[in-house]
Image (cartoon, grey):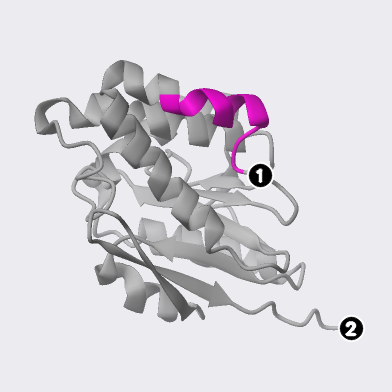
Amino acid sequence: MVNASARVATPDDLDAVVAAFTGAFLDDPVWGPAFPDVRRRAVQAAVMWRVYAGSALRYPWTLVTPGVEAAAVWIPPGGVELTEEEAGGLEERIARVTDAGTARAVMEIGERFEAAHPDEPFFYLTILGTHPDHRGKGLGMGLLAESLDRIDAQGAPAYLESTNPANLKRYESVGFRVRDEIPLASGAVVTSMWRPGREIPR
C-alpha cells in the first residue's frame, strides 16, 4: 500500500512531472542523444515527455512524491501508453520542434520497445525520474518501492526498459531481473527487466 510519501498525480502536477522527466533524462544514454541539438534538447524533449505523462494520467498509476520531485509512470495491464490519436500525432509534434529525421528516430526507439514487450499482462514502468535538483536523496527508489508495494497487492508482474546501465543494480535490488537486450539504431543497447508477481496472502 502506498503511504503518505507518495500520491497519485493529478492534471495539476503535469508541468512539474514534465520538468522532472526533462531534467532526469537530459543526459540519459538513450534519450539524450535522441535529441542531438544540445542547446535546445530540454525544450524539444519536453514535448515528448508531456505527451506521455499527460496521457498516462487517465490511469490512477502515475505516482509522485509530495512535491513532485520524482515521478513514476505505470501503465496497468491491458492499458496503452498513448491513445490512437496521441500516437498518430506524436511524430509530427516532435518534428515541429526538431526535424523529420530526429522525430522518426525517436519514434523508432519506442517501436523497438513495443516490439520487445512480453505477451502476458504486466504493469509497465514507462518512465521513472527524479528532478536533478533532488537527486541523491533516494526519492526515485523510494517511489519505485512504494509503486511495487501497490502492484504486489494485486499479485501482478512488472516490466521496464532501462536506458541507463547504471540503474540495473538498483532495479535488481527491488526484484527485477534482466529479461532481454534491445539494440537501437544508434548503437545503444537497452535492457528490459521483469519482476514476477507476488502471491497475494489468503
Residue 36 coordinates in the image, percent (x, y): 16, 37
Magenta residues, start to end: 81-91
Q: Is 2 colored magenta in this rendering?
A: no
In this view, 164 is above or below 100:
below
Residue 120 coordinates in the image, percent (x, y): 72, 69
- The residue lying at 45 percent from left, 69 percent from top is 192
Residue 124 coordinates in the image, percent (x, y): 59, 58
Magenta span main SS = helix
- The residue lying at 58 percent from left, 60 percent from top is 147
Which residue was labeled with disc 1? 80
Quadrant (top left/top right/bottom left/bottom right) for the C terminus: bottom right
Classify mark 1: residues with Cα within 10 Å, few (<14), some (14-19) or many (20+): few
Of pointers 1 and 2, the one earlier in the residue sequence: 1
Residue at the extreme right = 202
In this view, 11 is above or below 120:
above
Between residue 106 and residue 31, name the one nearer to us. 106
Q: Is residue 70 left or right of residue 44?
A: right
Residue at the extreme top = 96
Which residue was labeled with disc 2? 202
Q: Is residue 98 left or right of residue 150?
A: left
Between residue 108 and residue 59, name the one nearer to us. 108
- Mark count: 2
Under tag 2, what secondary structure? loop
| Amino acid residing under circle 2 | Arg
| Amino acid residing under circle 1 | Val
Q: Is 85 colored magenta in this rendering?
A: yes
Q: Is residue 97 left or right of residue 180?
A: left
The answer to which quarter of the image holds residue 142 is: bottom left
- The residue lying at 19 percent from left, 45 percent from top is 33
